[in-house]
Amino acid sequence: MQNLPTTLPEWLAMLETRHSETQINMGLERVQAVKARMGLQFSCPVVMVAGTNGKGSTCAMLESVLLRAGYKVGLYIKPHFLDFNERARVNGAMAGDAELVASFAAVEAARGATPLTYFEFTTLAILHLLAGAGLDVAILEVGLGGRLDAVNVIDADVAIVTSVDIDHTDYLGSTREAIGFEKAGIFRPGKAAICSDPVPPQSLIDHAAAIGADLWLMGRDFNYSGDKQQWNYGGRAQRRNSLAYPSLRGANQILNAAAVLAALEVLRLELPVGAQEVRSGLVLVELPGRFQVLPGRPSVILDVAHNPHAAAALSQNLGNMGFHPYTYAVFGSMQDKDIDGVMAAMGEHVDHWCVCGLASARAAGAAELAAKAQLMLAGRSDSDERSVAIFADPAEAYANALSRAGENDRIVVFGSFLTVAGVMVARKSSLH
């Protein structure tokens, strides 16, 4: 136990070097063992959220509504953009360095000789922090999959699966049925299991039945209806009418919001929430990097779309934005993503590709992205007015797009979290 780090940056640096050999190590035995030694458990309702896309939005809306209702809410969400502290929130505020350092030390003390990956170690630390914060409710976002994700060592009172699509195929399988089974791993016997995917995989339905979970399906157990001004929620025993649309943009957000209201219906005895709190919670919710349109001109849109399903949603949202003469894309991606699928979903909108490298060993090379972009533009009749340029990092790519874009044009920053984070950092430093 000698010479443990005393600051958060020192802890994170140590964990990154210590666990570089085991980036992702599937299986919960090690995490379960350390959790047991820590005596880690929650004395409040726990809502767990998994899914290919829409997890962050669902967590943010649920947190926003419950905060408006006066509850003390804990949130674990990831990855972070600028500061690690973003991953742990208590009552809407990021956890402080001192609290995180104390929780890291608690995990290290209980770990003994048990090796933990960076993700496992930090997850246990944040769970420890939240479990000791005197919460009324905890909201936990699952990282990869569900069944074998470190967060799944906690038993959720309500489990939500937002969407099931193809991503992380190396770990989760290459079909929606295989991935659906992994996501359904967060369901528990006798507890509510909510799925807001309109076409849930049969594997998810079968697993819920096999373990005796209380499955809530979109269209069967809960649904929504609406017009341009407002929408209505209908559940098993609760209706909510004349609701405002969520401030998070995009057609898919109504599915996420309906799942949030289903979760609140399940918890209505422990955590009653009024109509006005639901309305204001949905209107005031904020989530960086999910179809986030920044103020000013040219329009700048930040979106962490990094799989075809998310890119298709981004494309649809861009199509609803009205006319822009030219669209510049700042794009960087991890190598293990379906890059062709992502770029194809966005191809109709992008006139100028500013592709970039990323600071990760898993990143795709910018030259490879540029070659794919050139192929896409080659098929267009107006290809002589289009361009592809290569940059070392997101900040350079964004600076170039900004220098070329007219005030009526738009810049879309998308792909990896690292792409969006790189531009956020660049914008932040340019303001100081």
Image (cartoon, rainbow, N blue to C red):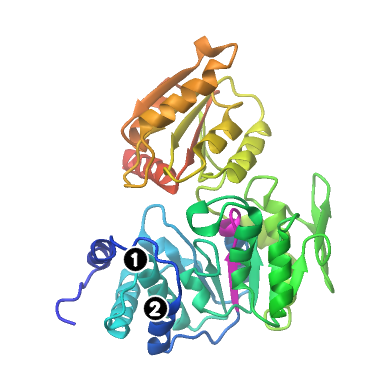
- Label 1: few (<14), some or many (≥20) within 10 Å? some
**First-in-chain label (2 vs 1):** 2
Residue 21 in the image: state x and y as whole percent: 28, 61
Q: Which residue is mark 2?
A: 30
Q: Tally the marks.
A: 2
Query: Which disc is residue 292 wearing?
Result: none
Identify the residue at horizontal 52%, vertical 41% (top origin).
Answer: 338
Q: Mark 2 and mark 1: span between their CA atoms?
A: 13 Å
- The residue at which mark 1 appears reads as 118
Kind of residue indicated by mark 1: Tyr
| Above or below, comparing residue 185 to residue 244 in the picture | below
Q: Residue at x 54, y 23 (%)?
A: 376
- Label 2: few (<14), some or many (≥20) within 10 Å? some
Q: Residue at x 50, y 78 (%)?
A: 153
Give how far across and how far down residue 417 sits, in percent: 44, 48
Nearest to the eye among marks 2 and 1: give it. 2
In the rendered view, tell whether residue 189 sits above or below residue 17: below
Q: Nearer the viewer, residue 412 or 407?
A: 412
Closer to the camera in the image, 273 or 178 = 178
**Magenta segment boundaries in residue numbering:** 46-57
Depth check: give the residue in front, 236 or 132. Answer: 236
Name the quadrant containing residue 163.
bottom right
Say left or right for 221 vs 305.
right
Tag 2: residue type? Arg
Task: Indicate whether 317 appears above or below 382.
Answer: below
User: Which residue ends up furthest to the left in the rendered image?
Assistant: 3
